[in-house]
Amino acid sequence: MAWLLLGSVILLWGVNWPVMKLGIKDIPPMTFAVIRMLLGAVCMFGVLALRGNRIRLPSRHDLPIVLTVGLLQMGAFLGLVTVALQFVSAGRSSILAYTTALWVVPGAALFLGERLTGTKLTGFMLGMAGVAVMFNPVAFDWTDRDVLVGNGLLMLAALAWAAQIIQVRGHRWHASPLELAPWQFTVAAVVLFPIALFMDAGRSVDWTGRAVAVLFYNGPIATAFCFWAVVTVNRALPAITTSLGTLGVPVAGVAASAAMLGEPVTLTNLAGLVLILGGLAWLALGDRIKPRAQ
C-alpha cells in the first residue's frame, strides 16, 4: 500500500509542476500557496466528517509533528517553491526541489541510525548522479540574479523537507496522519497568510477558468490527498527510501512540463532521467531483499 501511494504521489505531483507554473500567471505566488493550504484543510476536515471521525485538537504528543509538517513540508517547502517558479522553469524546479535525498542521507544515519545496504547505496548513488547530470551547473547562468534566487530557494525548500522527513520517521504517533492533516494545513495557512499580505501587496487574483481549474487540481488532489499520502509513506518506509522514491516526481515533472508547456527535453535531461529511474529500480530491489537468517 505504501508503494502504491508513493506511485500516485509521483504521478500527481509531477503533473502539478506545470500546473503550478500556469497557476501563478493568474494568482500571485504566496496567495496561491495560502489558497492551496486552505483548500487542503477544508477537504481534509470534510473527509474526517464523512468518515464519522470526531474532529478534535491534536494532543500535546502529536503537536510537534503538526507544527513541523505544517511549517516545513507544507508551509516552507510550498512557499519557497511557489515563489521560485516565477524565475525557474517547471521541469528544472521539480529536479532541484527533489534533491531532498541528498540532505536526508546524513541526517537519517545520524539521528535515526538507518543503515545503507549495498543495494540501497547503489540506488542512492544512481539517483544522485541523475540529479547532478540534470542540474548541469556548467550551463548555469551565474550572473542572473533571478536565476540565483530561484534556484537557491528551491535548494532551501529541499533542505526543509529533508528535515521534516527525518522528524516524521522518529516521531511516535498517537493520532493518524488523516486526523492530523487538516491541522497541519491550517498551521501552514496561518503562517503563510501574513507573508502573502506583504509579498503580494497590490496584486489580485485573476479569476479565469484556468485559475479555477488549477485550484481545483491543487486543493483536493495535489494538496489534500498527496500531502496525506506522503506522510503515510514516510511512516511506512525508511527515510532514505522515501526521499529517493520521491525522485520519481521530477521524472514525471519534466515529462509533464514538456507535454503541457513545451519545455525542451535535452539529452542532458534524458541522461538524468535514465539514472534516476535506475536508482529507483535498485531502491525497490533493496526493499524486497530480506536479510538471510544467521
Image (cartoon, helix red, strand yellow):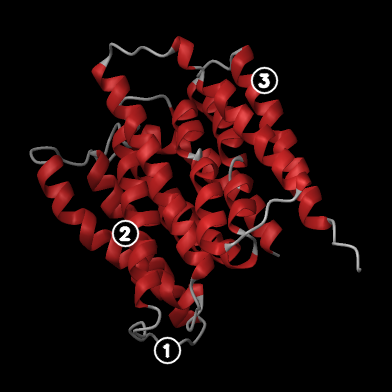
Q: Secondary structure at mark 3?
A: helix
Q: Which residue is mark 2?
A: 71
Q: Is residue 239 visible?
A: yes
**Disc 2 residue type?**
Leu
Q: Which residue is farthest left?
A: 202
- CA separation, marks 2 and 1? 24 Å
Q: Is residue 213 visible?
A: no
53 left or right, relative to 244 = left
**Disc 1 residue type?**
Arg
Pick the residue in front: 11 or 100.
100
232 left or right, relative to 78 = right
- CA separation, marks 3 and 2? 35 Å
Q: Secondary structure at mark 2?
A: helix
Q: Quadrant of the N terminus?
A: bottom right
Pick the residue in front: 285 or 94.
285
Residue 84: give x, y in percent of width and height. Answer: 32, 33
Q: Name the residue at 31% across, 54% down.
A: 75
Q: Residues within 10 Å of mark 1 (few under 14, many from 20)?
A: few
Residue 88: give x, y in percent of width and height. Answer: 37, 25
**Disc 3 residue type?**
Ala
Q: Which residue is mark 3?
A: 271
